[in-house]
């Protein structure tokens, strides 16, 4: 039976450490501020944004909430971003994705001041990550690095297999794994929908990160004994319960846990870490912006 990797517990420890950094900044008259901008056709986005704001408020980070109607012109969003870029009180800016269909998300990302880009998605921040001197690491892969570190799972010399090559999870995860740095030094394979004989690749993994968005896609038959399984997926599937649905990952938990030495649950694995790392990046942005040094976990 595999060990369950408790993302809630690790995220709670991280938040406690970040609390001291927020207090240090507040004592120096610089309470961190995160501005969230919502212009999304997806009803779930509102929930995600309010969760992020609650997380901020719990730590004493100011959360600024800006909502723009989905039918407004793109210019409205771009002007808001420009204003937030210029506002000295704002340390971090997060534009919740997806944005309205008529808005080019790439342009949105490029307009955010890279110093305030707490998602780490601006091309300048992506470039720095790839080059090996990251400013803000994207929250989900950074959270996974922290989770592995907290569990005492060394990545050095390991075979890491990342299934998925998205801009927000797969690619930055692979980039972090290959860095010549703590939490890196892994020999890394990136798989995607055009990968031939996927199971042959996933069976090579000492550490497997599943980020496909396909419910319970990776099962035990695709894994080798002793693998560490990190399940990024969050999928709603129909269920015979009060809510009418349940959340499952991209990994078939039951069969995978028969092979894995350690595995993340869904929910309660990667999700809480993603949220904690947004706070981390906001505190880091506030520290960079104010020039007040803080100890980051
Ligand atoms: P995307 O849809 O952007 O990317 C999915 C990736 O999986 C693509 O690279 C795709 O390949 C690959 N893929 C899809 N089907 C297959 C297949 N059959 N075989 C191999 N590869 C496949 O998803 P995201 O990266 O944004 O998200 C992945 C999952 O993680 C989702 O469930 C999402 O909800 C969840 N998520 C969870 C977070 C958390 O905090 N826990 C944060 C972010 C996401 P190709 O490129 O060839 O199309």
Image (spheres, rainbow, N blue to C red):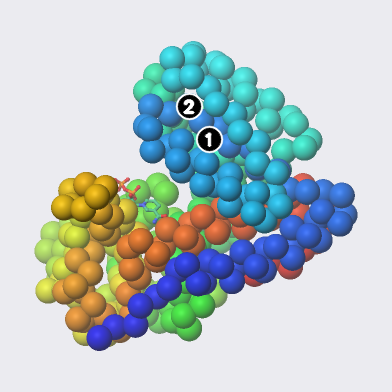
Percent x, y of residue 34: 65, 42
Q: What element carries label 2?
A: loop
Specify the quadrant of the image occupied by residue 13: bottom right
Instruction: List the residue tagged with mark 1.
Output: 95
Query: Residue at position x 26%, y 80% from top?
Result: 260
Instruction: Pick whichever of labels 2 and 1 is earlier in the sequence.
Output: 2
x and y percentages locating residue 271 in the rendered image: 42, 58
Label 1 beta carbon less than 8 Å to ligand 1: no
Circle 1 residues within 10 Å: few <14, some 14–19, many ≥20: many
**Label total for image:** 2
In the picture, the quarter occupied by the C terminus is bottom right
Placement of 33 over or under 58, stated as above or below: above
From this viewpoint, which residue is outermost toward the right?
Answer: 28
Please tell me the numbered disc located at residue 155. none
Q: Do the residues labelled 2 and 1 touch (CB within 8 Å)?
A: yes
Q: Does the residue labelled 2 lie within 8 Å of ligand 1?
A: no
Where's residue 107, x and y in %?
A: 49, 28
Q: Is residue 253 left or right of residue 72?
A: left
Residue name at image x 46 percent, y 43 percent: 48
Q: Does 66 sit left or right of 30 as displayed?
A: left
Check disc 2 and report the residue beneath it.
39
**In this image, 233 relative to 182: left or right?**
left
Q: Which image quarter is the N terminus in?
A: bottom left
- Report the front residue among 267 and 135: 267
- Which residue: 19% across, 66% down? 252
Q: Residue 77, located in which quarter of the rendered image?
A: top right
Residue shown at 78% from the left, 60% from the top: 23
Tell me the element at label 1. strand
Q: In which quarter of the image is residue 113?
A: top right
Instruction: Answer above or below: position of 200 versus 157.
Output: above
What's the CA distance linking mark 2 and mark 1? 8 Å
């Amino acid at each position: 039976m595999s060990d369950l990797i408790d993302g809630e517990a690790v995220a709670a420890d991280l938040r406690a450490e970040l609390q001291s950094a927020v207090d240090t900044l507040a004592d120096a008259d610089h309470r961190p501020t995160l501005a969230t901008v919502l212009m999304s056709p997806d009803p779930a986005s509102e929930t995600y944004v309010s969760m992020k704001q609650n997380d901020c408020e719990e730590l004493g980070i100011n959360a600024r909430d800006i909502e723009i109607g989905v039918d407004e012109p793109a210019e409205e969003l771009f002007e808001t971003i420009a204003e937030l870029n210029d506002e000295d009180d704002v340390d971090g800016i997060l534009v919740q994705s997806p944005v309205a269909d008529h808005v080019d998300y790439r342009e949105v990302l490029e307009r955010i001041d890279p110093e305030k880009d707490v998602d780490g998605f601006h091309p300048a921040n992506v470039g720095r990550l790839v080059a090996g001197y990251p400013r803000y690491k994207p929250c989900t892969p950074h959270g996974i690095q922290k989770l592995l570190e907290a569990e005492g799972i060394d990545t050095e010399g390991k075979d890491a297999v990342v299934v998925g090559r998205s801009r927000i999870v797969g690619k930055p995860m692979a980039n972090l794994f290959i860095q010549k740095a703590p939490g890196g030094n892994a020999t890394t394979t990136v798989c995607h929908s055009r990968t031939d004989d996927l199971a042959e690749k996933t069976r090579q993994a000492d550490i497997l990160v599943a980020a496909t968005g396909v419910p319970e896609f990776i099962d035990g038959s695709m894994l080798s004994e002793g693998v560490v399984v990190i399940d990024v997926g969050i999928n709603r599937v129909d269920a015979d319960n009060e809510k009418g649905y349940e959340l499952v990952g991209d990994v078939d938990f039951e069969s995978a846990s028969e092979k894995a030495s350690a595995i993340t649950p869904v929910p309660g694995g990667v999700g809480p870490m993603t949220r904690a790392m947004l706070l981390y990046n906001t505190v880091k942005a506030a520290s960079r912006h104010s020039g007040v040094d803080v100890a980051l976990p």
